[in-house]
Image (cartoon, coloured by chain):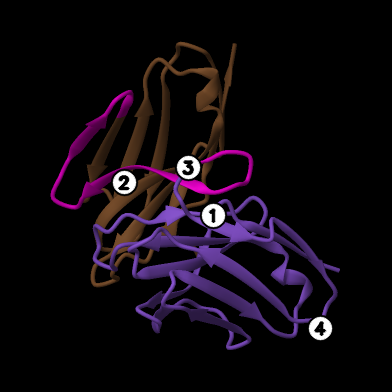
Chain colours: A brown, B purple
């Protein structure tokens, strides 16, 4: 079974609004990463947050990590139609090298 | 573009057949990982190769096997195909296999088993 669970499963917003996706996991991690996938094709790495970090920014992306609650959130600010995609969190387990364990994903649709 | 390519793009096979999927990693990347993504699910780790040796395996049966070659190409072989093997198969390359080595994914091969 997959370690990560994402919430919501699907999200529809208007262009310019912010989108927030949440990820929960069950075990000890080394780091947590977020990926984007367009139309069932390859995944694109967005951001990595280490287990000793609480918040990280990259452009319009803001990621938080709460290891006590075993949860993370991805915030996309000022969304654009081009942000329409599926977003996955993926955890790196402690001692797991760089093997990724993915969540179930959030489908984001940004409408004009 | 991640610089990782996969072939073929789509493939249709019959139950019981064998299939070989190919991946070309970024130059200099010594590690390749393979993932299976069923429709509507997140990718699941199949196995990883580092410098042509298997370096970890997920919960997949032995009929899933792989090879990695010195020219940064690799293969995923699946024998005795089952209907449940229908999925998108993704390869990802990375410099190494430390926890912070980013994986760069190819566009995937969509396999349909009839």
Q: Which chain carries label 3?
A: B
Q: Earlier in the sequence, mark 1 or mark 3?
A: 3
Dot 4 and dot 2 within a common chain: no
Which span of residues is magenta-colored?
Answer: A36-61
Where does label 1 land, which residue? Answer: B42
CA–CA distance between discs 3 and 4?
A: 35 Å
Query: Is the Cβ of the residue at disc 4 closer than 8 Å to that at disc 1?
Result: no
* Mark 3 burial class by Cα count in 10 Å: few <14, some 14-19, many 20+: few
Residue A31 rendering spot, x and y as whole percentages: 25, 55
Could you tell me which residue is drawn at 54 percent across and 49 percent down? A42
Q: Which residue lies furthest to the bottom in this view?
A: B62
On screen, residue A42 versus residue A96, left or right, reads: right
Task: Please give the name of the residue rendered at 45% of the width and 13% of the height, measured from the top-left corner.
Answer: A17
Helix or strand or loop: what does disc 4 sit on?
loop
Question: Is A79 rendered above or below residue A70?
Answer: above
Q: Residue A71 carries which label?
A: 2
């Amino acid at each position: 079974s997959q370690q990560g669970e994402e919430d919501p499963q699907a999200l529809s917003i208007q262009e310019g609004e912010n989108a927030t996706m949440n990820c929960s996991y069950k075990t000890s991690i080394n780091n947590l990463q977020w990926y984007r996938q367009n139309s069932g094709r390859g995944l694109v790495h967005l951001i990595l947050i280490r287990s000793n970090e609480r918040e990280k920014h990259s452009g319009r992306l803001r990621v938080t990590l709460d290891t006590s609650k075993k949860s993370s959130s991805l915030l996309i600010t000022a969304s654009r139609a081009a942000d329409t995609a599926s977003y996955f969190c993926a955890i790196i387990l402690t001692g797991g090298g760089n093997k990724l364990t993915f969540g179930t994903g959030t489908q984001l649709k940004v409408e004009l | 573009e991640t610089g990782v390519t996969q072939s073929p793009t789509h493939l249709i096979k019959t139950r019981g057949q064998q299939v070989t999927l190919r991946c070309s990693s970024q130059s200099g990347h010594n590690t390749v990982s393979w993932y299976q993504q069923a429709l509507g699910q997140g990718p699941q780790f199949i196995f990883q190769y580092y410098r042509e040796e298997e370096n970890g395996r997920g919960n997949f049966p032995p009929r899933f096997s792989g090879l990695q070659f010195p020219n940064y190409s690799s293969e995923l072989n699946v024998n005795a195909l089952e209907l449940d093997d229908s999925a998108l198969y993704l390869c990802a390359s990375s410099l190494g296999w430390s926890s912070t080595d980013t994986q760069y994914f190819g566009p995937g091969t969509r396999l349909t088993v009839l």
